[in-house]
Amino acid sequence: MPRTLARSILAGALTLAAAAASAQEVNLYSSRHYDTDERLYTDFEKATGIKVNRIEAGADELIERMKAEGRNSPADVFLTTDAGRMWRAEEAGILAPVESEILDERIPEHLRHPDDLWFGFSQRARIIFYDKQDVTEPPQTYAELADPKWKGRVCTRSGSNIYMLSLLASKIAHDGEAAATEWAQGLWDNRARDPQGGDTDQLRAIVSGECDVVLANTYYFARALRTEVDGVTAHVDRIGWVFPDQDGNGAHVNVSAGAMAAHAPHPEAAKAFLEYLASDSAQEYFSKGNDEYPAVEGVTQADSTAQLGEFKADELNLAELGRNQARAQMIYDSVGYE
């Protein structure tokens, strides 16, 4: 479908949904804690007249709240980061499928649930960062991180972290459990320190000289290119990066995703909100406001992510990450990955 036609359909759908939801509201349960998202909500309100009411908390807390509320839940839309968390919501039975030609057309198939239970609206790649002062030939694949030559040089987050679980879940999907277990063991054996902190802390560990190679999501580093991040921005020239597996499956990506709640009291408004998140304007703001990659092809991305360069992304359907999450945790536990 031509992009101009898609935009026309999108505008029409929003108008119709707004009319159907006249004087309505949409209740958003969100675990995205980015101040820059404020514009997403205010622009939607201006475009449709639908008021956005927000409840913000951790993903697991919101999932448990929606389960406890049951059919009486006021939630219309659940918004969170990582397909693994969307899988938890799916398993909890709190999501409803959305039939939308707009979402099916604009959101790539691998970035949405096969049964339209959720849709990815922004992307982040989990890639390799390294110390350019000490590393002249950085790893080019995820597999290389488990090579003994990197013993005592690699830093990551905890094995219970959702980003680490999703990465291992993708390896299970591609290579099987035995290979994934061998990789997790090698990665653990190569640690420069026991896992600690968030992704920004991994980047700071490069600057401090504690770690030569780390895993982190792209937007943590891209943010340091755009604005001041303590302990990183002043030293960005020291940090190099590699998009892994460019001759193979491609770099592991994950998403921020949205879904309609199973008992949404305002389903028309919820659908309108989700379709709005796929619009060019919202997609650009996901990228420029939080240094993520748009989910919709052809949308202008942030200067910060553009500086990282083009890359081949893994097109594994992200629903696989959730399905393999429990096995990923079992593997990390089995090798003693803290």
Image (cartoon, grey):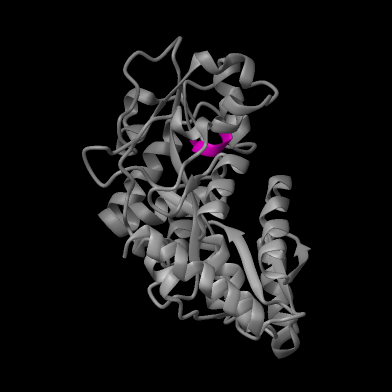
Q: Position of residue 119 (x, y in %)?
A: 48, 66
What secondary structure prevails in the magenta region?
helix
Front-most of residues 258 and 177: 258
Front-most of residues 30 and 288: 288
Q: Which residues are magenta?
A: 216-220
Q: Position of residue 227 (x, y in %)?
A: 66, 27
- Quarter of the picture holding the N terminus: bottom left
Image quadrant assignment for residue 50: bottom right
Front-most of residues 105 and 196: 105
Front-most of residues 135 and 301: 301
Residue 320 in sight from this viewpoint: no
Image quadrant assignment for residue 111: bottom left
- Residue under the image location 39 percent in, 48 percent down: 298
Above or below, 136 relative to 41:
above
Image quadrant assignment for residue 246: top left
Q: Is residue 149 magenta?
A: no
Residue 179 in sight from this viewpoint: yes
Q: Position of residue 27 (x, y in %)?
A: 73, 73
